[in-house]
Image (spheres, rainbow, N blue to C red):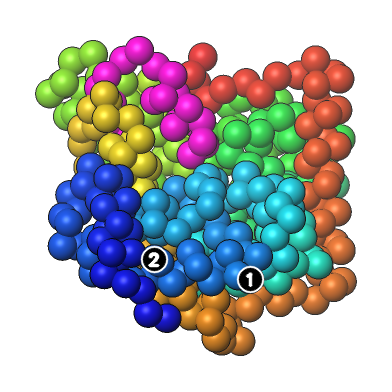
């Protein structure tokens, strides 16, 4: 598709208004303007919705995405949308979650990107754990494949994990796959948690020493972390929450100085969306999320490969959907019982 010089200049200006806040020059924006123009034109023609996880790069989040958020929230967005085609800029399990919730829609991912948590456990691993602990219920974190979800009793997100665990009828809960999150949850529930050994390669990189160093350098700074971090890190921070909860905290807080103990995409979002906030300390890049590119998005719209199209066996969709729907039922039950989503210690 050809676009006039005027169209490209206007698009470069639109991109630069956002991306300049994270170091992009006008020339950088001019280079990608033809591609973002084509992507945005094709998505309108095809009635497609482009979703971007908050760990994506700024050119995708602010160049072509219709919505930015966390994995589950975006899957709900896909379900609510009248669009018939979903391009999910994320790791593969997130595209699968969107397909589970919207099986009638075409769901595509720009690149086949794994996830250290999702890849750490298989459906057979879950069946083996069930055999070893026949009285235990199984709760899986949303960062799991469709095949794994299909073997579990209920799904959870990082924001409602405690609620779901507390509302489960069993006294023993197999919590998969995130060992560090499970260790953070165990002190907060009376249930016995049986943990797998999955870890997020991003969040396990952070150390309590790095948190202490930033606090010493910037007295009064608010330090926020994701519950996929180790308990030793969690014990040093001011707030722990999901991706969306961290962003909400920053957006609504009167404080100005923050350290975000999570993936770098969140820092980019804050720098672009909340220029009155100061972010200190280092973040860690997710190599899987960064496999997604504008070129991959364009390919998914123009001529998708078999690998880009998310396909799940209907029987797996049915079972995995039941797992997710049980999350809603348990969350409602927990509210009826008067349970609250007690926060990880640093938030209490």
Residue 135 percent across, percent down from the top left: 85, 47
Q: Which residue is mark 2?
A: 36
Residue 344 percent across, percent down from the top left: 53, 25
Q: Nearer the viewer, residue 212 or 174?
A: 212
Q: Which residues are magenta?
A: 241-262
Q: Nearer the viewer, residue 261 or 345?
A: 261
Q: Which residue is mark 1?
A: 46
- The secondary element bearing badge 1 is classed as loop
- The secondary element bearing badge 2 is classed as helix
Q: Residues within 10 Å of mark 1 (few under 14, many from 20)?
A: few
Q: Is residue 270 above or below residue 70?
A: above
Residue drawn at x 84%, y 44% is 326
Residue 23 percent across, percent down from the top left: 17, 49
Distance, label 2 to label 1, CA atoms, is 15 Å
Residue drawn at x 48%, y 64% is 40
Q: Within the magenta stretch, is there residue 211? A: no
């Amino acid at each position: 598709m050809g676009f006039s010089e005027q169209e490209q200049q206007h698009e470069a200006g639109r991109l630069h208004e956002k991306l300049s806040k994270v170091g992009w020059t006008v020339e950088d924006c001019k280079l990608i303007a033809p591609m973002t123009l084509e992507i945005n034109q094709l998505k309108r023609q095809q009635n497609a919705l482009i979703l971007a996880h908050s760990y994506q790069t700024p050119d995708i989040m602010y160049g072509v995405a219709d919505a930015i958020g966390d994995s589950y929230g975006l899957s709900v967005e896909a379900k609510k949308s009248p669009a018939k085609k979903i391009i999910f800029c994320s790791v593969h399990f997130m595209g699968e979650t969107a397909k589970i919730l919207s099986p009638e829609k075409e769901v595509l991912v720009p690149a086949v990107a794994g996830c250290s948590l999702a890849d750490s456990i298989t459906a057979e691993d879950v069946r083996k754990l069930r055999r070893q602990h026949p009285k235990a219920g199984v709760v899986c974190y949303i960062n799991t494949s469709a095949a794994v979800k299909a073997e579990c009793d209920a799904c959870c997100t990082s924001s409602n994990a405690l609620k779901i665990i507390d509302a489960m009828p069993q006294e023993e809960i197999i919590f998969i796959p995130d060992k560090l999150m499970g260790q953070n949850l165990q002190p907060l529930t009376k249930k016995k948690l049986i943990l797998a050994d999955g870890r997020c390669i991003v969040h396990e990189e952070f150390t309590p020493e790095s948190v202490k160093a930033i606090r010493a350098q910037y007295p009064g700074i608010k330090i926020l972390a994701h519950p996929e971090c180790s308990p030793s890190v969690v014990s040093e921070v001011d707030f722990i929450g999901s991706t969306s909860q961290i962003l909400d905290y920053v957006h609504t807080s009167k404080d100005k100085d923050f350290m975000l103990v999570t993936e770098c995409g969140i820092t980019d979002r804050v720098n672009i969306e909340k220029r009155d906030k100061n972010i200190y300390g280092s973040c860690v890049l997710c190599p899987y999320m960064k496999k997604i590119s504008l070129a991959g998005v364009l390919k998914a719209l123009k001529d998708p490969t078999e690998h880009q199209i998310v396909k799940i066996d209907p029987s797996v969709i049915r079972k995995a959907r039941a797992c997710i729907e049980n999350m809603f039922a348990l969350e409602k039950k927990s509210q009826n019982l008067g349970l609250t989503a007690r926060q990880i210690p640093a938030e209490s």
